[in-house]
Image (cartoon, rainbow, N blue to C red):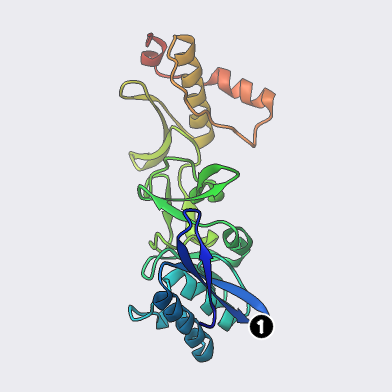
Amino acid sequence: MKGVFTTRKKDNSISYRVSITLHGKHISLGSYDNKKTAGAVYLDGRHIIDCKLAPENYNSEFTIPHDKFIVLSNYVINGLYVPTPVFLRKQYFEYYLSETDILKFDRDDLFFYSSHKIQQKGGYLFVSDYGSQYKILTRYGIRPFAVYGRDYIMVNHDRNDYRYSNIKIINKYTGVRQKTLREKTVYEAYIHVNGVYIVGRYEDEISAAIAYNKAVDTLHKNGIKKAYIKNYIVSYKKEDYLSHYEKLSISDKLLNIKV
């Protein structure tokens, strides 16, 4: 059968590998357990090429997996082969987690997501790189465990739109949140020690971030061994950081917490 090749798995069982050639490029359409399915996938591939089908043309009648449909459709229409389920639009690209779950990214991110498969686990999106898993939010300077609506928002309220202009970071630092008190914005530093303790309230977020660091140091000196993530203040030289650190006051309650 054209486009279908018989192979053997490690357990010596037969598998049917499907590939299709377009403009001299051999594109894998997957491996299947029976020849009939493999043949149907190949015919779907030919149909995508002949009719120049776009992602919106996909339906449940196709045998070809959805991600393979997207890869082939993108190559047919846009002339660019990308091994991940990416489809180029005019000023951005779409990444298809599924037929209905579609992410948007700036074209500047195309190189990264063409070589990194996005996975979903526990409501979080992540990629694997050099043996480790990274939440894709970290690419935008958003901290691990950041909370949507408190620490960052999507400007157009579409939480699948990861274009840089659509992401607004509200709280950059660990243990810091904005609050409005008597119509004035303040920055509250807080820390978890068998419950939430308020470190203090400050006029700017950097002061709150440094106060949080000071609270971490204080707790460690008092024998608390929890591994807190401290804030790194890029805009401060070491001497400026230390000077600001010494001037900041933190809650007396934290000073008295011991093991």
Q: Reply above or below: 135 against 57.
A: above
Q: Residue 112, image x and y in percent? A: 61, 58
Residue pictured at 47% horizontal, 66% vertical: 15
Which residue is at the far left?
195
Q: Reply above or below: 62 against 202.
A: below
Q: Between 191 and 101, which is closer to the camera in this rendering?
A: 101
Which amino acid type corresponds to the residue marked 1 in the rendered image? His
Res 88 visible: no
- Crowdedness of circle 1 by 10 Å Cα count: few (<14), some, many (20+)? few
Residue pictured at 39% horizontal, 13% vertical: 252
Q: Quadrant of the C terminus?
A: top left
Which residue is identified by label 1? Answer: 23
Residue pictured at 57% horizontal, 60% vertical: 113
Q: Residue 192, image x and y in percent? A: 37, 25
Q: Between 196 and 59, which is closer to the camera in this rendering?
A: 59
Q: Residue 104, image x and y in percent? A: 48, 66
Residue pictured at 51% horizontal, 86% vertical: 46
Q: Is residue 253 left or right of residue 24?
A: left
- Where is residue 34, by image quadrant? bottom left
Q: Residue 122, image x and y in percent? A: 35, 47
Q: Between 117 and 181, which is closer to the camera in this rendering?
A: 117
Res 49 visible: yes
- Where is residue 191, by image quadrant? top left
